[in-house]
Image (tube, coloured by chain):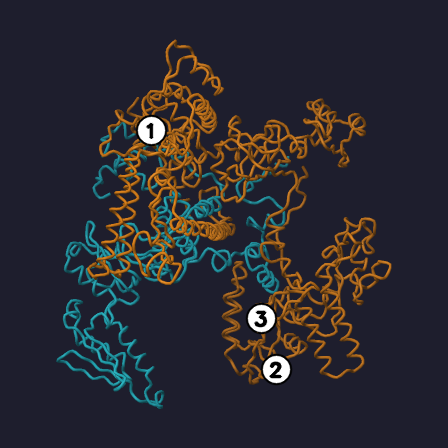
Amino acid sequence: MNPVLKQISQIAFGLMSPENIREMSVRKIETPDTYDEDGYPIERGLMDPHLGVIDPSLKCKTCGSKGGDCQGHFGSIELSRPVVHVGFGDTIYKILQSTCNKCGRILLTESEIESYTSKINELMENGESLTKIIKEVYKEAKGIDKCPYCGEEQEEIKIDKPVSIMEGGYRLTQSEIRERLEKINNEDSLLLGVNHEVARPEWMVLTVLPVPPVTVRPSITLESGERSEDDLTHKLVDILRINQRLIENMEAGAPQLIVEDLWELLQYHVTTYFDNESSGIPPARHRSKRPLKTLTQRLKGKEGRFRNNLSGKRVNFSARTVISPDPNISINEVGVPETIAKEVTVPVHVNEWNVDEMREYIKNGSDVHPGANYVIRLDKRKIRIYDETKEAILEKLKPGYIVERHLKDGDIVLFNRQPSLHRMSMMAHEVKILPYKTFRLNLCVCPPYNADFDGDEMNMHVFQTDESRAEAKSLMRVQEHILSPRFGGPIIGAIHDHISGAYLLTRKGSMFTEEQAFQVIRKAKMIIPKKKNDNWTGKELFSLLLPDKLNMQYKAEICNKCDICKGKECHYDAYVVIEDGELITGVIDEKAYGSFSGKILDKIVKKYGSDRARQFLDESTNLAISGIMKVGITTSTHDEDIPEEAKERIQDHLANAEEKVDQLVEAYENNELEALPGRSLEETLEMKIMQVLGEARDKSGKIAEDYFGMDNHSVIMATTGARASMLNLTQISACVGQQSVRGGRIDRGYIERTLPHFKKNELGAKARGFVHSSYKEGLNPIEFYFHAMGGREGLVDTAVRTAQSGYMQRRLVNALQDISVKDNGMVTDNKGLIIQTMFGEDGVDPTKSDHGKVADLDRIIDEMRVK
Amino acid sequence: MEDINQKVINKVIKIAKKKEAKFPESYIYDIAEAYDRRELTDKELETLIFRIKKAYEHSKVESGEAIGTVAAQSVGEPGTQMTMNTFHYAGVVELNVTLGLPRLIEIVDARKTISTPTMVIYFDEDHRFDEEFVKKTASTIAKITINDVLDDFHVDYGQMNVEIVVSPEKVKEKHLEFDDIILDIEKSFKKHIINIDDEDYSITIAPKLDKRTKNGIQIRDVRLLADKLRNLQISGVKDVNRVIIRKDEEWVLHTEGSNLKAVLKMNGIDKVRTTTNNIHEIYTVLGIEATRNAIIKEALNTLDEQGLSVDIRHIMLVADMMTVDGAVKSIGRHGISGTKSSVLARAAFEETGKHLLHASIRGEVDELTGIIENIIIGQPIPIGTGSVSIMMKNK
């Protein structure tokens, strides 16, 4: 696109002198009125056309350009009396404290001045912060009560926030303040934190006020035809009005008291014009009682200019809609609705090789899909393609033109879901145009985006330059982000049905006739293998996807963690052995290719590269899904059915536990309980009861588990890591267990008891939130109430946590964002300060490492020995 | 590591040199250890080193990589998955320790006072298994107040005095001396009348009439005296409230409250392994390098405890950034972000107005070398692919 013509190399900050302000000003503003009866701006009013225009039909009286082209010009208000700038109230106070009230010299001896000056000069040369040393100067000078130069006794100076300065009991007027600041010489002012090259202390007291151009404070016309002025304009009107009145009163020789009152009022208006939230003064309000948004408020905070408009900007060529899943597209792709594809465009430079293609797009126009919306001519004019203009454009089309064509299959776009907590929250996808109105994405990319489909929306951005497209394709593509830099393992991987599907397919005894096997393979869009005229096992089917020469051994997620591992002879088929790309034993589950823990996937990315990994992930998830469709999976509450006998055992067990709790309580009441070291009796009792009840829940869960087999689909999902956990299942079928608030049993509600159904100070299991029932049986009202208490705490916790961790992350990113690796491997920040001589002490990128290590030594040795 | 033969290490170093492989030291140890454990032949060792060399070269960070942002995200992102609750420590049931997100925030904030300071005290080789010694040390560390050694205590509003009766058994049990207690009391109640009865171990204290109490002694004065007396610390290390004795492989003390400086001065303590979770204390006692390691250790433990794996290199970078200039700086407006050289970067973070106003009178110049500065003015950022530019040769 447009080459960079000029680069900003630095920005210098300084204070404006009254002369500067007058010089910059194109017009002195005097009348507080804005428009006359006819709606025309009044000359020398706040809407003076010399300050620039907004309406494109008008011409700026200063520069002559039309509204929209003119960026505006500053005006000025001559203040009849000087006024302190709020932002500098504190600085002025400190300066006055540190200088003589008579001669204006800093209250330090010559030698002190010399030593501080050299220190400050040195710091300035190194570009370091002066804040510390200037604080020291203030502190030193403040304590001296006799001027070392003129011998004048110094009176104590106090500040009445934000801008009033008191000396002894007398309040200094702004003119007096200004006079004192004028007396300070340049050398001293440097020590006081005012760099005389860009600022003078007295400039902190304003005599002229700049008036920002109208473009900064545009007025809006309401539907009713009424004009509504910007907050800044309102404030400036106030200032002008008081300023005018002050002039009149002074000219008329009004009594001192009245002049002072008006002066004070002028100070108030100027103060609130700069900052309407300064402490100590009431904020200026709109008629509707809403506080005005003045200059500081415009810049400050999350919705301020800096964070909302400068650090983050609104962009064109972006789209947002609801997301929904599509297992049939690759992880690298994103399904884009046609309506969006016709709206966001890609600029294409016309040349002799693509001119015919572009002609086709223009012929289609903006309403037919692979079409185009605009054409940019050689003179850089942008022309919309309409049915009427099509012909004319087609005629003139030649190399050098730019056609803004619709998005089409294969284009690279950026895809993002907020909150963007890590770099995997923005990845580049290839476009696939699909019908309907939602973005479609492969299920494997849900974990990095942390997306689900309960109404989540995502954003898409279309690249506009070839450079950005190239960069995105090589660095930001989904397949390049399978491994997370956080821990060096896969973050993109199979979830839910992919996992239970693969398990059902590869578990022991899963057999398919050749016909069935080929149906599955065909459905999974895999390459059809050679016929072998025999039955196929699921393991054989899965092996088709594994790369050759892949060897590995690990324990699957379903591993029972037996005391003695039988290895390949595992009874549960949980020991996975892959030899030369052939799945010999073991089942495929979450440990194999799930997100966050997939070992096979991990190895494939690291050994065979991201292309092969993408292929493996696409194919294996497809196979798992076609497998699950062949075998079938279903779940209902019947999965959690347990026989009557089990229920009895659980009831017995719970009764037993409750008895134990009662015994503990009794022991406590009889003072027979022995306290744990460093704990009170009450704490000891609570801990013991919690332990007993925790065990009771676990044990009843274990009882229920005895009746669950691997033919139970809910159990399959829980044990393979597809979804839910055994705890969920036991809570449904056996016992929900203890509810907790603030990490302990429930002990709040009524005075000395949780609910009026219990005796005061009752400590039994039921009285403190133990839920005996299972979800399936249903909770009794008391249990339900306790359950809701625990549930509420969880919700509050999540809400508080997101806010806190969000702020922590913002601070972390802000503190570390300038750090990068230099060519010599050193880690430095933008100033060149060396933070590490080698990243992480060994210079290894965690993304490329094997869970933090360069290589697994044992694995390498094993591989060496196999050969 | 001690059991790895120095010979083996030298051998590995020699081969590594031959293969021109420049590994960090820790790799050498790992390889030597594997050599021993797997009984490698020399030829196998050579191929192993060659392979590792290749793997190492392959996995180096690329120059220009924005590792700062990656580290910040890697530490920050798991924050959303952490709990807010404080649970007890794995292993030591009796101690409450702040965990999860609040603890992580505490660490990056470099707080001066943390919510649950705690120490782990180890003993040196001679005393590691000496139960008697450990218990004695524990009792000298733990805070003991008068209240802990009392037999009887009463406030006499008739006489306007407080009488305590010390239990000799309890005093002995706590390894204390009655005379020391009296000294302590005399030291802290100089302005009071103290009567000591050595025989039945009773002490009577009454407020003295002075300027402050010229209107006669009030009941309130006696009550305050009683509270002060009961809570008077007669033994123990300052700031340590409780000590828990544990035996795993050896005797270890866990404390609630922390005072590393005082504990390190005590006899029989393993000064190398004894540690605290208070980062600022480590800084004042042991210095900046130890602080860096403490930040890494504490942050890693907090994350691990929640079952979140974060590569140690990210945490190292955070710790190094916090400690680069020799003092501990917090992550935030009072620390790193507040002392950045760029005005725009500071203004874009927090306290926008303050930074702009200060910059104007100081005449600060923004060199626009950072990330946000360049985003603000709409130029490419000088990091990653933006850190290189192409120059055309003039022919």
- Residue located beneath label 2 in the image: A102
Please, what is the three-letter code of the amino acid marked with disc 1? Met
Provide residue A440's location: percent of width, then percent of height: 56, 32
Q: Which residue is found at the position 38% from the left and 57% from the top?
A: A755
* SS at mark 2 in the image: loop
- Which of discs 2 and 1 lies nearer the camera? The answer is 1
In the image: residue A790, left or right of residue A221: left
Residue appearing at x 47%, y 37% in the figure: A447
B362 shown above or below B195? above
Q: Is residue A152 above or below residue A268?
A: below
Which chain is indicated by disc 2?
A
Does label 1 lie on the same chain as label 2? yes
Residue A268: x and y, percent?
Answer: 67, 71
Distance between mark 2 and mark 3 Cα atoms: 21 Å
Residue A710's tag is 1
Q: Nearer the viewer, residue B122 or A507?
A: A507
Q: Which chain is cyan?
A: B
User: Mark 3 = which residue?
Assistant: A90
Query: Which of marks 1 and 3 precedes in the sequence?
Result: 3
Q: Nearer the viewer, residue A523 or A330?
A: A523
Which corner quadrant of the image does residue A473 belong to?
Answer: top right
